[in-house]
Amino acid sequence: MIYWAPLLHFYQPPTQSHKVLAEICEESYRPLVKVFKDHPESRVTINMCGVLTEMLADHGFGDVTAGLGELGRLGQVEFVESAKFHAILPLIPESEAKRQIELNKKTNLSFFKDSYKPRGFFLPEMCYSDAAGSIVRGMGYEWVIVSGIANQGKWPMDYVTSFKLGSGSMKVFFRDDIISNMISFKNIDAPGFVSRIKELAEKKQDAYIVTAMDAETFGHHVKGWENAFLGKVYGIIKDSKEVKAVKISELLEKFPVVKGRPPRPSSWSTSNEEIMAGNYYPLWNTPHNTIHRLQWEHMNICLKIFQEAEDKSDNEKSEQFFNTARENLDMALHSCQFWWANKDRMWSENLINKGLILQEEAVFNAYLAVANSGRRDWEKKKCYRKMITARYIAGKIRDEILS
């Protein structure tokens, strides 16, 4: 038997427009829910970033979350934990990473109720580091899913890898990047996929494969793919004695856990050459990308000013500005502004700028929190100079965008 464990990643940035979100719901999210309901035998693991969960409710698309919640109660869907605003966890402070995870848990529990019982963790963009892994393990999650490029040992198909992490251990599932990308880019059809995974298990009594991709692949990026691929695959394997769809955590009950080497720092968009060069997260923080460098300089100043505001808010007015800064900083950590700042690959002037505006709002309100506190004048002036530096860097970012 070959067990197929698919994962779908649902996410939209906090800057997404109502129009685009409506299109994605109509083309992808609602059709996906229908496919799963039409195939009671279907099993799928879902990551739903909390920012999207809230946006669906706020924009009148609560039927999507209601449908997924129902599928969770029926046992067809397993939810995993993640970062609410899709922050790249290895690139942000530990305190912010933990906050992103706690916010995600709180948000999704409020919508999915008892359907939301995550055992595993989806790192945004599958950006893994041992530090991020330690945070996840420390918060009580059993396993992470990472890109296949992160694997350092024999490819696990009939066992689950467990690796040492600090004073404890963590289980890891590796995404089959080749087959996942074939599905994502419509380079394999449903019968071809079923035949392909059967071949993978030919010499083993039992084996498994994990695929993972953006949920929006089905219907939004590739029109009709939710039926032409997912629906057809579920139909083909419905009564099969050779292939079965399962949720990822079910694999822990079917396969032994074997100690292995830890994953390499990487993402699901990182090449082996980039890993060897130490460029682990190239689409979000690559050394030769001037805009990335400036974005992170600005973000680091933002974080420093915010920390000062957190330490110094000592009256109601100051606290109000601090709370506004906190809300904007949570959103400002989202990954898309960095992803779209790659002129040779992905490029959007407006999406870079929208992320920068969120950072600027966080800086502005954090400074106002300090300025309206009872702190001494020299402390306020010091914070003001940091805000001026941030403003200068923001200008340089916009100059780079326009050059």
Image (cartoon, grey):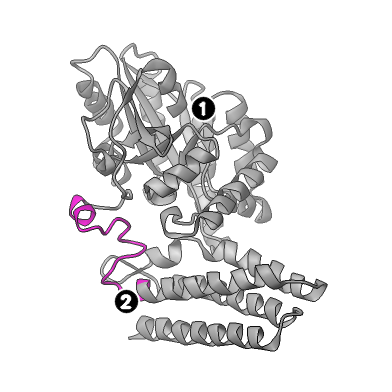
Q: Is residue 282 magenta?
A: yes
Q: Disc 2 or 1, which lies upstream in sequence?
A: 1
* Quarter of the image where one finds residue 106: top right
Mark 1: give few (<14), some (14-19) or many (20+) Cα within 10 Å: few
- x and y percentages locating residue 376 in the rendered image: 71, 84
Residue 290 disc label: 2
Q: Nearer the viewer, residue 57 or 288?
A: 288
**Image quarter (top left, top right, bottom left or bottom right) of the N terminus:** top left
2 vs 1, front mark: 2
Residue topped by disc 1: 38
Indicate the secondary structure of the residue bearing disc 1: helix
Magenta region, residue range = 272-292
Q: Is residue 155 left or right of residue 65?
A: left
Residue 58 visible within the image: yes
x and y, in percent, of residue 73 in the image: 62, 26
Asked if residue 197 lies in the magenta stretch, the reply is: no
Q: Amino acid at mark 1?
A: Asp
